Amino acid sequence: MKLASAIVLSMGVTQTAATLTQAMKDAILKKHNDLRAAVKSPHAPCTAADMETLVWDSALETAAQTYADKCIGDHDPALTSMGGSTSHGENLFMQFPGTDFTQDQLLTKGVQGWYDEYKDTEWTLDSKGLNSKKYTDTSKCQSPDTANSACFIGHFTQVIWAKTNKIGCAVKQCPSGTGLTIGGTKYASGVILVCRYTPMGNSATKGVGLNIPFMYGKPCAACAGKCDTAGLCNAAATPTRCKDTVSDSAPLTVDKKYTSCADLKVKYPTWCSVYEKTFKQSTGSDVCPLMCGICTVPSGMGKSQCGATGGGTTKAGATTKAGATTTTKAGATTKAGATTTKAATTTAIAKLSTASTITGKLKMDITLPAGTTAADFVKDTKVKTGFAKGIAARLTGVTHSMISIVLTVETRRRLEMETDGRRLAASKIAVDYTINIPKGTVTQAGLDAVSANLKKASGAADKGAWATSMKSALDTETSKTFTVAVTASPDPTTKKEAITGTTSVANGLAGLSAAAVAVIISAIVIA
C-alpha cells in the first residue's frame, strides 16, 4: 500500500544537529512506545491486548540512513509495499526549506504527526478493516491523498501495529546543491527523517482495507505476567494470539472460498486432525488453531474487555535506551510446502525389488515474465510439469511422470501481496520434489546416483547445467521465457518402501486428487 509522507514547513528553528544523537534516538523510541502503550478510544475503538514493545535495531537504522542519504521524500521503491523485495515498514517526515532541525520537531511534528492520522481514520469496534475518511477538501487531512480524494492513514497504523517490534531511524540534512526531491519536485534544501520497522505492518485485505492492527482486549492480556511496562508486552515475550485466520475479510480458497473455519470443518470433517498440520508445514502458520484446540484464548481478550485495567508495573512508555546491538534480518522466509506422494505405474524389470521414494528441495531464483503472477505460477500445472521434466532430464532412469512437484514462494508475505496483483520478479522459489521409483526400475547403484545428482544441483560444477535444463523445460512447456538460477540443493532423503496409492491427505480431501491437494497446499489464496 503506497503511503504519502508527512511534510511541514520549517519555522523558527533555533537548535541544530547533524545526525540523530543518542538522546534523539532514545526519545524517538520512547515516543513510539508511549503512543503504542496508550492507544485507546477515541483514537482507536479498543485497547490493545497484544501490543509488543519496540526495541531499537541497528540494521534498520543503517537501512534508514542509507535511504535518507538519497534526499528523496518518497517511499523507497525497494520495499515490498512498493513492489520491491525489502520487507520493512517505513514512515517518512520532511521539513523544508533549511537544514536545521530539533528533537522537538522530530517528535511533535514527525512521530506525533504520523500518529495523528487517527483523526482521518474510519474505524469502529465492528469494522472488518480500516479506511480513510472522505473529505470534499483533502486539505482537512493530516496527510492528504489528493489523487484518491482521501487521506493517508498508514503512518498511524504502522506506529501502532502490534506485531512490529523493531525500529531504526535516521535523519539527513539535504543542503543547497543536493536539495530535497519530493514527488518529482526538487526543493532547494530540507531535512528528512526515515524510520524503518519490522515485522512490517499495514497488511491489507482487498475490498476491506487495512487489517486491524492489534487484538482487542485488556492491555497486555495476551502476555499476562510478561508486561513490565503498562500496555506493552515485554520485548522478549511472544503474545498469545489465539484466533482462527479465516473470516469474511480473510477468506481461504480451497475447492471454493470459505469464510469461516466452521464451514471448512463441515466440508472436511478431518480438517483438524489432518489438514491443519499440513497447512502449517506448508505455510508456516496456523489456519484454524482456535477451532482445532491448538491454542487457548487468554483471559481478558475480546471486545468486552476494551478499556479494562491492564498489566504492567511501571509507567507507560518507560524510558528505553536505543541500543546498537540488536539486529534483524529482513524478509524472513516461511517453511517450504510439504511434499505429496503419488503412486507411479511403470512396468517392472528385474532390478530393485522394492519401490523407492526420494524427497527433497531445490531452491531457485526465477524471474517471472511480464504478466505472470506468483499465485498463477505456483498453481500452473504446466509449470509443475516443466519442473518435473527439467529434473528428469538430469537423472538417469527417472521419467517426469515419476515426479510430483510442490512450488512455494519462500516469503509468505510476498505471496499474500501477490493476490492483490503484484508480480514477483527474481522470486525465490522452493521446488519440493517427490520421486516415486517403482520396484524393478533401477539398480541400487542407479538409485544412489540419482540421489547424488540431486544433491549436486547447486554445486559450482553442475548448477549451470541444472539451470539450463529447468529453463528449457519451463520455456517449452509454458511457451514463456524464464530466467532460472539454482541456489541450493539440500541433501535429499531416500526411502525404500512399497507405494500403495495416494497419501492420506489426498484420501481425506474428498474428491480431490493428490495433485490437486499439492496445488491447494502450496498456493493458499487469501483474497
Image (cartoon, helix red, strand yellow):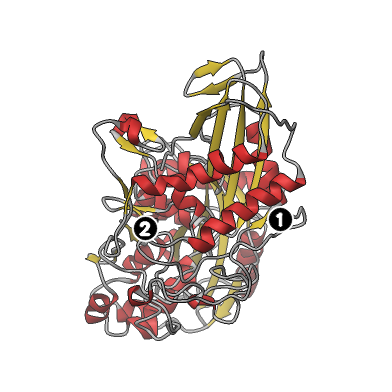
Left or right of 285 in this view: 178 = right
Q: Image point 50% across, 31% down: which residue?
A: 7
Q: Image quarter for residue 86?
A: top right
Q: Where in the figure is residue 159, as x and y percent of width and height? A: 51, 52
Give the total number of marks visible in the rendering. 2
Q: Where in the figure is residue 364, as x and y percent of width and height? A: 56, 50
Q: Which quarter of the rendered picture does the C terminus lie within?
A: bottom left
According to the image, label 2 marks what residue? 42
Q: Is residue 340 above or below residue 504?
A: above
According to the image, label 1 marks what residue? 327
Observer-nearest of 231 and 439:
231
Observer-nearest of 235 and 283:
235
Q: In 3D space, how far apart are the residues under numbered discs 1 and 2 (Cα atoms)?
A: 35 Å
Q: Image quarter for residue 195?
A: top right
Q: Is residue 172 visible in the rendered structure shown here?
A: yes
- Select label 1 or label 2 by which is in front: 2
Q: Is residue 136 above or below residue 447?
A: above
User: Badge 2: how crowded within 10 Å, few (<14), some, or many (20+)?
Assistant: few
Left or right of 302 in this view: 33 = right
Q: Image point 54% across, 17% down: which residue?
A: 186
Q: Is residue 178 above or below residue 50?
A: above
Observer-nearest of 151 and 436:
151
Q: Is residue 80 visible in the rendered structure shown here?
A: no
Q: Secondary structure at mark 1?
A: loop
Q: Amino acid at mark 2?
A: Pro
User: Badge 1: how crowded within 10 Å, few (<14), some, or many (20+)?
Assistant: some
Q: Earlier in the sequence, mark 1 or mark 2?
A: 2
Left or right of 114 in this view: 71 = right
Question: In the rendering, which numbered label is found on residue 242?
Answer: none
Q: Which quarter of the rendered picture does the N terminus lie within?
A: top left
